[in-house]
């Protein structure tokens, strides 16, 4: 595959995967945020007395906070890798392959 076609394929693949990757990452990150900051809502109290007793912190955040922050930052980093680094590395690999072919075969590629 010539480098021009490879670049077109990389761009088309990036356009195709951008929305699903971002949507899944953003929804997961936003869904884990209350767990990470320790948002507590007492639903029983809310249903009986209409007082939800909303507060941050508590015992749950001691365990779930670090776990959810780890998933949030890991997912953010993996999203960046998926959308930016992997296509860039593939493009560099294709360019390098054609330069090596041209170097060892004596032919000039565009």
Image: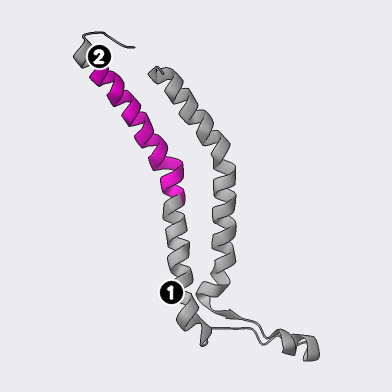
Residue marked by disc 1: 66
Q: For the residues marked 1 and 2, what is the alpha-carbon distance in whole angstroms? A: 51 Å
Q: x and y percent of residue 66 in the render?
A: 43, 74
Label 2 sits on a secondary structure element that is: helix
Q: Which of the colour schemes (rainbow, by chain, secondary structure, one colour) is used?
A: one colour
Taking 47 as reference, is 65 left or right? left
Report the number of numbered marks. Answer: 2
When asked about the image quadrant of residue 52, the answer is bottom right
Query: Where does the N terminus fall, quadrant-wise?
Result: top left
40 or 103: nearer the viewer: 103
Which stretch is magenta?
79-101
Label 1 sits on a secondary structure element that is: helix
Taking 83 as reference, is 92 left or right? left
Query: Where does the C terminus fall, quadrant-wise?
Result: top left
Using the image, determine if residue 88 lies above or below residue 6.
Answer: below
Q: Residue at x 46, y 83 (%)?
A: 62
Taking 96 as reference, is 19 left or right? right
Q: Residue at x 47, y 76 (%)?
A: 65
Q: Residue at x 75, y 86 (%)?
A: 46
Inspect this view and state whether residue 47 appears: yes
Residue 19's disc number: none
84 in magenta: yes
1 or 87: nearer the viewer: 1
Main SS, magenta residues: helix
- The outermost residue toward the top is 107
53 in magenta: no
Residue marked by disc 2: 102
Q: x and y percent of residue 48 in the render?
A: 79, 90
Label 1: few (<14), some (14–19) or many (≥20) C-alpha neighbours in 10 Å: some
Taking 62 as reference, is 18 left or right? right
Q: x and y percent of residue 41 in the render?
A: 65, 82
């Amino acid at each position: 595959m010539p480098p021009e076609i490879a670049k077109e394929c990389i761009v088309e693949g990036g356009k195709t995967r951008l929305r699903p990757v971002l949507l899944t990452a953003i929804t997961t990150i936003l869904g884990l945020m209350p767990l990470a900051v320790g948002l507590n809502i007492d639903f029983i109290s809310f249903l009986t007395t209409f007082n939800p007793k909303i507060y941050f912190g508590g015992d749950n955040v001691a365990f779930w906070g670090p776990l959810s922050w780890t998933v949030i930052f890991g997912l953010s980093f993996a999203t960046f890798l998926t959308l930016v680094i992997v296509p860039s590395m593939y493009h560099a690999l294709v360019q390098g392959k054609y330069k090596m072919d041209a170097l060892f075969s004596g032919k000039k590629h565009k």
